Image: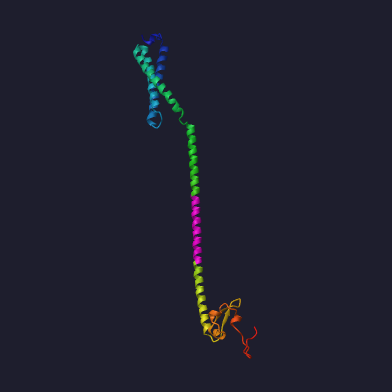
Amino acid sequence: MPHGHCYLWTPVLLWLYVVSDSVIALSYFTIPLALLYLVKKRKDIQFNWIFVMFSVFIFACGMTHLISIFTIWMPAYWVDASVKGVTAIASAITAFMLWRLMPLALTMTSTKQLQKNIDQLEFEVKQRLFAESQLAELNNNLEEIVQQRTQELINTVDELQHEIARRKLSEHALFKEKKQALVTLESIADGVITTDMSSNVTYLNPVAESMTGWTNDDAIGKPVLEVFRILNESTRKLAAN
């Protein structure tokens, strides 16, 4: 017996059932399409298989409402029972898998926590970039300081080399002048005796050697009064110092 007899074929009641079941069935058919579209476009979503199971379950629920409309006029209760059985199996499996998935789903990072992690990573990246810029600036300053110190050292070495060269030239000129002076002292006819600040003999020319009886080598370092004696012209005796 069709379900319409249960409704006493009351038009308003009958069509209220028909329209309601039609809208519910249409909605149940639309939701799986949306879920399957999401799974297709977002392959990166974890546990996307659960969306497929929900799609099967919701589609089966839609079929039960569609069969409910059919059985108003046709007593196809075996078909109705079969669809409900499939729906029951699909709903049971979906519920079981959903509860199995629940512990893992609860450990997933929330959007708020994910944004917090992203903000923290961005902050750390900024800190690292700032540290790298500071290090690069420090390296540049260090290179400038090293170059400056190196140039100063090069300049100092150049100055020392110039000073050494100048002193060598001065020593060479002084040695040449001293040699010329010795030649002059040795060639003049007068006796020449040179002393240091302590009145010790530093040089006797050949004439002075003849006059004093001292050789230059023996006289060097002796007090001048020990080497050179002044004679009285009248008595030819040693004069008083």
Work out which residue is located at the far bottom of the displayed protein and give it.
Answer: 234
Using residue 7 as the reference point, say whether residue 177 is left or right of it.
right
The one of 32 and 84 positioned closer to us in this rendering? 84
Q: Quadrant for residue 72, please give it.
A: top left
Q: Is residue 62 visible?
A: no
Magenta residue check for 148 = yes
Residue at the image point whose x is 48% and y is 45% from the top: 129
Q: Position of residue 109 (x, y in %)?
A: 46, 31
Q: How was this image coloured?
A: rainbow
> Is residue 56 shown to the viewer in this render?
yes
* Residue closer to the observer: 197 or 34: 197
Q: What x and y, as percent, mark residue 84?
A: 37, 16
Give x and y (percent) for residue 102. 44, 25
Q: Quadrant of the C terminus?
A: bottom right
Viewer-side residue, 124 vs 240: 240
Depth check, front residue: 133 or 163: 163
- Which residue sits at x=49%, y=44%? 128
Q: Which residues are magenta?
A: 136-160
Residue 174 at x, y = what percent?
Answer: 52, 76
Q: State the predominant SS element of the stretch in magenta.
A: helix
- Give left or right: position of 239 versus 96: right
Query: What quarter of the picture does the N terminus occupy?
Result: top left
Q: Is residue 174 above or below residue 56?
A: below
- Compared to residue 132, the image places residue 74 above or below, namely above
Q: Residue at x 35, y 15 (%)?
A: 82
Q: Quadrant of residue 66?
A: top left
Answer left or right for 9 relative to 129. Answer: left
Task: Residue 190: say if magenta.
Answer: no
Question: Residue 222 is drawn in which quadrant?
Answer: bottom right
| Vertical comparison of 154 with 43: above or below | below
